[in-house]
Image (cartoon, grey):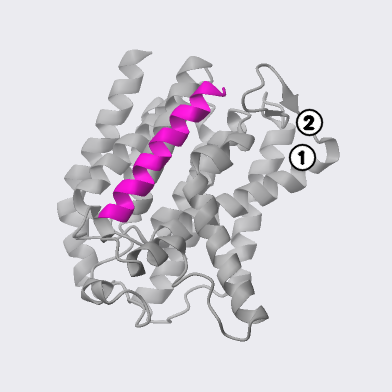
Amino acid sequence: MNHTVIMSVVVSFAISVILGPFIIPFLRRLKVGQTVRDDGPQSHLKKSGTPTMGGILILFGITVTSLIYMKDYPKILPVLFVTLGFGLIGFLDDYIKVVLKRSLGLRAWQKMLGQFLVTGVFAYYMTEYADVSLAMKIPFWPNQYLDLGIWNLPLLFFVMLATVNGANFTDGLDGLASSVTVMIATFFTVVAIGTASGIEPITCAVVGALMGFLLFNVHPASVFMGDTGSLALGGFVAATAYILQMPLFIPIVALIYTLEVVSVIIQVGYFKLTGGKRFFKMAPLHHHFELCGWSETRVVAVFTIATAVLCLLALAGV
């Protein structure tokens, strides 16, 4: 068991680190540079042109490691499918935006259709093939489950799409989405091992791949993950939570995801209701703190430490 856990982290970490010096210059040659919002923090303007789509590095690490262990750990498959499915949607979005130079990427309905299809296949697997119920463990209430009957499926769609878009909004500062998600993946690894769930190789692979990616993604970042990475990570978090029967833990361990989404909803709603006033200085939330005078590295550190504390709290509630 320990051998599998350690090797999964090491292999995916090594893949990310080894591929980085090859893939990042390739992305730079493709001119897949990030476009930075003019109305954002001025410090971000210097990021313009930094290659994006670096999520490919993360996906390589996760996929290769998962395939090595798939035979002995078949429960990895649905989590890998969701991770790669959302990663593909993100890749297409990034590719259209930065390579084909269509600024909006995939149209909203195309992105939503893709997300519904991937979630639909996962939902079908969970109801027809998985030996895991859609009943959800209740945090801080040992051995108690919440089963919503016919509402389990609509909730699954909501949780999946909300988590994916939460991860997407979190990806806005150097190392932010990577650092927050590595904490969440570590939490799921501890639970997966403790419950002998059979998915620990992929949770470990995510930890390793993200640690490797962070070598290139910490401030000042030489590559961004793009939607390729952020959508994939959101899919991983939601799918893993369902395999472990822990979707009710997502608002705890991924509170940062939740706050980022909620800040955007509040900002847009408030803007419309007040005829142009803003509730936050800027949304998503990490930009608000930047405009309040926090440095980028401070925001990342605080959000990551908060996530680590929340994960420890959630472990107490398992």
| Residue 83 image label | none
What quarter of the picture does the C terminus occupy? top right
Percent coordinates x, y for residue 194 in the rendering = 48, 16
Q: What stretch is highlighted in magenta?
A: 298-318
Going 73% across and 25% down the picture, which residue do you hit? 145
Asked if residue 305 is among those painted magenta in the image, a careful observer would answer yes
Q: Where is 308 relative to 22, above or below? A: above
Q: Is residue 176 above or below residue 131?
A: below
Identify the residue at horizontal 44%, vertical 72% (top origin): 281
Residue under numbered circle 1? 152
Is residue 124 in view?
Answer: yes
Given the current orientation, which residue lies at the most extreme bottom position?
Answer: 275
Front residue of 215/138: it is: 138
The residue depicted at 23 percent of the width and 69 percent of the height is 50
CB atoms of marks 2 and 1 within 8 Å: yes
Mark 2 highlights which residue? 147
Q: Does the magenta stretch include residue 287?
A: no
Q: What residue type is labelled 2?
A: Asp
Of all residues, the one furthest to the front in this rendering is 292
**CA separation in Å, label 2 and label 1:** 7 Å
Question: For residue 18, which quarter of the picture?
Answer: top left
Question: In the image, what residue occupies the spot 43% across and 82% down?
Answer: 102
Locate residue 268 relative to residue 207 in the image: left or right. right
Relative placement, left or right, of 153 versus 98 is right
